[in-house]
Image: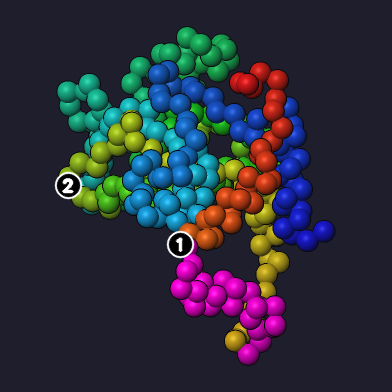
Amino acid sequence: MDTLASADAVVDEAYTRDTPLTTFYRAIPNCRPPQRADRSAAGTMPTRAFRYCEALTAASAFGWYLFPPINFSLIWDGGSDIIWTYQGADAWFPLKVAQFPHFADHFDRVAPAALKGFSPPFLAAFKEPGVVQIWSGLIARTAPDWSLLVRAPANLARSQGYDHYEGIVETDRWFGPLFTNIRLTRTNAPVEFDAEFPFLQVQPVHRGIYGPALDAFEVVPGLDRFGSRDWDDFRTTVVVPNVDPHRQRGQYAVAARRQRKQRGPARPPRRGDPA
């Protein structure tokens, strides 16, 4: 079985399980729950791109949006010092390691006795200048052999005051805070995080399609090595649409949507699903 066929098989197997592919656990009370990522990039995508560019809309919709658990701001001096504040606070605080407001007490009231005092921090400044770890307020569990790619929201405009580090978390076996690391890029001015605006996008990836599986690739060194099938496919994709005076826009999008419809639902209905 080739790599793509294997990937299809594991995806099909995951969707026949009785448990969800991903379960999110909200630890911080009242933080906004995850939301399925949107094909229009939360309504920000240009209309023409949304209508005709299936590649763009498919990437935008791949995964779930996560939101900051509260409105908060960071200021970095460009060196080793970061200060922060949050909605409802009347001061700025030096940032080393910070708990979410009042969360430690809430955690200790709910957690088993042996776990009291181990509430995860909300923010932590790293030794590397300008690098901050931020907890989403969530914990996640995925189906066996599935992980979560944690990254910036796809195709969604975001603050120029920081960059995301991307990471793959093996959430089928690691049940802990779902966090991200950012690198601040703006100095001596507030960098703001909005609890109503997507901050992260997490995407399910099967362990079989990263790691050693990525060694299975090859490179065709030049045009003179293209085969007849390659030239035929190039003609169909590039040449034919450009010489047809009556061609309609968005043919790739139409074909992709038709194939998706023919494949049917992503998974069979489960007991308890709405009719």
Toward the viewer: 232 or 110?
A: 232
Q: State which tag comes first along the sequence, 2 or 1.
A: 2
Toward the viewer: 196 or 96?
A: 196
Segment colored magenta:
224-249
Up-down: is 99 above or below 64?
A: above
Residue at position x 53%, y 14% in the image: 111
Q: Quadrant of the N terminus?
A: bottom right
Toward the viewer: 204 or 116?
A: 204
Residue 233 in the magenta stretch? The answer is yes
Secondary element type, mark 1: loop
- Colour mapping: rainbow
Q: Quadrant of the C terminus?
A: top right
Q: Quadrant of residue 19?
A: top right
Up-down: is 236 above or below 168?
A: below
Q: In screen coordinates, is 10 left or right of 130? A: right
Residue at position x 73%, y 50% in the image: 8
Q: Position of residue 18 (x, y in %)?
A: 73, 27
Q: Which amino acid lies under the numbered mark 2 shown in the image of this protein?
A: Asn
How much space separates mark 2 and mark 1, taking CA atoms?
47 Å
Q: Quadrant of residue 269?
A: top right
* Residue on which disc 2 sits: 188
Q: Position of residue 55 (x, y in %)?
A: 50, 56
* Residue on which disc 1 sits: 249
